Image (cartoon, helix red, strand yellow):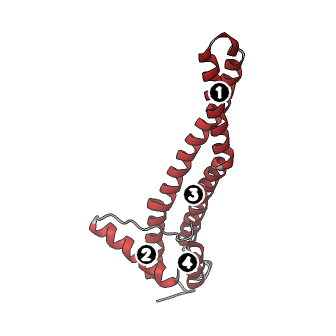
Amino acid sequence: MAKNGWSEELEVEMRDIIEVVKRKDIKDYARLGNLMLKINKILAISGPLLTGIAAIGSTFVGNGSWAAIIAVAAGALGSAVNAFEHGGQVGMVFEMYRNNAGFFRLLEESIEGTLEEKDLEKRENGELFEMKLALKFGRSLSQLKELARKSAYSRKEGTSFDEFASKLF
């Protein structure tokens, strides 16, 4: 019996969607964010370090040919690293991944908070909540229901499930 747009089936569907968000979306975006953070740290350290080596090597140019080669190579590498770091917007890509992971955590908390409210009349309308959630994931209602069904089936059968909840990011 549905009350305020909520039914037992809709609650189970929402819990299945939470599992997909936790298992795939949040985990993957947090992993990618950490990877980009490591890359950004390496680039942020190596660019100035190579430029410093080039500057120091340039002072010894008159003393031998190796100093000139090292100065030119380190300067070129330092310039390339800085261009890649800033031109490739590595820091911004890192922020994008972390922001997406936070967005999915917020959606997870929103769903859990709604489901924890025992009084169905105090909850947001279930059909409206489901439609909002589908829009936030970039899916239609039927796609959202199918996602929940696939998640429940894969969990029951113990198989892997390779679909993300969101189709936007």
The image shows residue 66, relative to residue 105, as above or below, that is above
What is the CA distance from the residue labelled 4 to the residue labelled 3?
17 Å
Residue 137, how many percent across, how many down? 55, 72
The mark nearer the N terminus, 4 or 2, is 4
Query: Observer-nearest residue: 48 or 155?
Result: 48
The mark nearer the N terminus, 1 or 2, is 1
Dot 4 lies on which element? helix
Q: Is residue 144 left or right of residue 53?
A: left
Residue to which mark 1 is pinned: 72
The mark nearer the N terminus, 4 or 1, is 1
Residue to which mark 4 is pinned: 134
Residue 51, how many percent across, how many down? 68, 28
- Residue occupying image coordinates x 56% and y 46%: 36
Residue 168, how many percent across, how many down? 57, 70
The mark nearer the N terminus, 3 or 1, is 1
Give the residue type that dot 4 points to.
Ala
Query: Observer-nearest residue: 82 or 19?
Result: 82
Dot 3 lies on which element? helix
Residue to which mark 3 is pinned: 101
Q: Residue furthest left?
A: 157
What is the CA distance from the residue labelled 3 to the residue labelled 1?
42 Å
Front tag of 4 and 1:
1
The image shows residue 104, relative to residue 129, as above or below, that is above
Quarter of the image where one finds residue 68: top right
Query: Observer-nearest residue: 48 or 66?
Result: 66
Dot 2 lies on which element? helix
Q: Residue furthest top?
A: 63
